Image (cartoon, grey):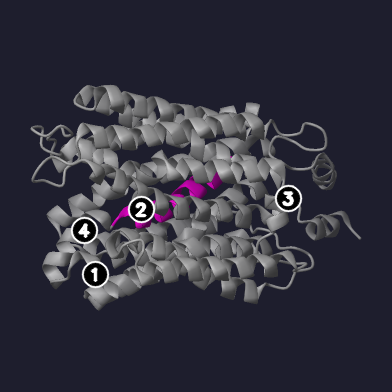
Amino acid sequence: MSDPARQAAAGVPDRATVPRSSFLVITALVLAECVSAFEAGMVFIALPRFGEIFGAPASTTGWAVTAYMLVAATTALVGGRLGDMYGRKRVLIIAMMVSILGSVISVFGDSMGAIILGRGVQGAAGAILPLCYGLAREVLPPAKVSLAVGYISGAALLAGSGGYFIAGVLLDVADWHMIFVFAAVLALVASAVAAFALPGTHTRGELPRFDYLGAALLTPGLVALLFGITQGPKWGWTSLGVVGLIGGGVVILAGWTVWELRQSDPLVNLRALASKRMALNLIAVSVLSLGPVGAVQIVTPLILQAPATLPVGLGASASMAGLVGGVGAIIGFAAAPVAGVVAGRWGGRSAFLVGAALFAVANLMILVGHKSMPVMIGVFVVGAVATAFAYTGYPKIVIESVPEDVTSVTTGVLATARQAFSAVSVAIVSVMLSLWTVPETTMPTTASLNLAVGWFIACSLIVVAICLFIGRPQSSGGTADGTKSGEIAASATSA
């Protein structure tokens, strides 16, 4: 067997196909993740407008968020696996083109039902982030992988905050249709750049059988579980609907787990997640999502925009709140390459640990200074840098710990876990903020805020402790990016 054929069978990218400009590759991956991050958050600010235009209650307009979340949770895993098997560049472009279709459905359907359907189709963008991580590892030189992961993670932060601002401006100067038009144009541009800048990615020499039954079990299991969690605060946690959805989802996912463990070519290699480093990484991501990552979007806007006459509130306008968030996001994006350097030099767990520690610092600042605008600006800055480090650290641990040909689906598992536990976090923190309220209002007292922020700090410190036990990547037999030294030698020989 020739060297290229042997590399293809082993799932090793042919370095001869890597373009000369890593800058173009990283730019393409950053643009692609901007599509995913923008579409994830673009409709939040438009929900009240949807209610006014279509005469729909909040329980209906909220489906514009829920539909996207439910589909994205599944496509992160299934899309990641398809990319690992059939070529990540191909699947990435397909995911972005499907998201364009979702925008078109929303614009021309011109109804609340069409918007919800279109948002569900847009959920295909949930596959983008794990595919980008896999592409960074596959097509870039090993020395550039950590930097690329940092920029991709920073793009998620920047586009998420920027999306809220851009959507608000479009609502003010045009109408809601333009939000979806902007999303479609962004996805079209990102697809064109990806087609031009990314090399043709490899597929495995002998393709495994796609686990159709595994995908068929995973989808309803995740949808039932996540939908049950999101509806818990509305329907009541002891209601038959919530108990049935969560219980049914758990039963289906338990059956899916048994099925996956019995397959030679599973949808998700659960045994890879059972290693010490990956298990601790998954736990750390889940705990951080239960804390500040999951529910920060509830607490910080509340502090900024609630009336200053209340115990919790600075009385800032929506524009001012968006500006503060935007400043934080820009600084967080600027910190992304620093996070990449830290992850490349000292391993992903070091970047993850720094991010978790900074989350604790940011929330300590809230405890002592939530009535001060300068302190809250500092909170957004520190929190954004924390996000850049944490979101660079945990995928880098995956790259250090699993084979290259399952990178995307494995990072997809962590992305899905982050989404699931974030939904749980929103439910937990919502209850905390409602325990003690200002008389004759629904606004929390300082005691309620302190309880929620204390929860964030505790979760952050737990993640710091977990990172200490993850350990550094093994130096013998592998490199910092998780590529076996023998594979690099084979690649160098063929080049």
Q: Earlier in the sequence, mark 1 or mark 4?
A: 4
Q: State yes or no: discs 2 and 3 in contact (Cβ < 8 Å).
A: no
User: Label 1 vs label 4: CA separation?
Assistant: 13 Å
User: Label 4 vs label 3: CA separation?
Assistant: 42 Å
Q: Pick whichever, 175 or 414, lies toward us.
A: 414
User: Label 2 vs label 3: CA separation?
Assistant: 30 Å
Q: Which residue, as the protein is rendered here, is positioned at the far front?
A: 238
Taking the image as drawn, is residue 215 in sight?
yes
Q: Specify the amino acid type for callout 1.
A: Thr
What percent of the width, then of the height, locates residue 286? 51, 46
Q: State yes or no: discs 4 and 3 in contact (Cβ < 8 Å).
A: no
Q: Is residue 121 above or below residue 236?
A: below
Q: Is residue 375 above or below residue 413?
A: above
Q: Which residue is the site of mark 1?
A: 60
Q: State yes or no: discs 1 and 3 in contact (Cβ < 8 Å).
A: no
What percent of the width, then of the height, locates residue 456? 39, 35
Location of the N terminus by quadrant is bottom right
Q: Which residue is the site of mark 2?
A: 38
Disc 4, SS: helix
User: Label 1 vs label 2: CA separation?
Assistant: 22 Å
Q: Specify the amino acid type for callout 4.
A: Ala
Reply yes or no: does residue 23 show up in magenta: yes
**Viewer-side label of 2, 3:** 3
Location of the C terminus by quadrant is top right
Q: Magenta region, mostly helix, strand or loop?
A: helix
Bounds of the magenta segment: 20-42
Q: Which residue is the site of mark 4?
A: 46
What percent of the width, then of the height, locates residue 404? 71, 51
433 sits left or right of 290 in the view: left
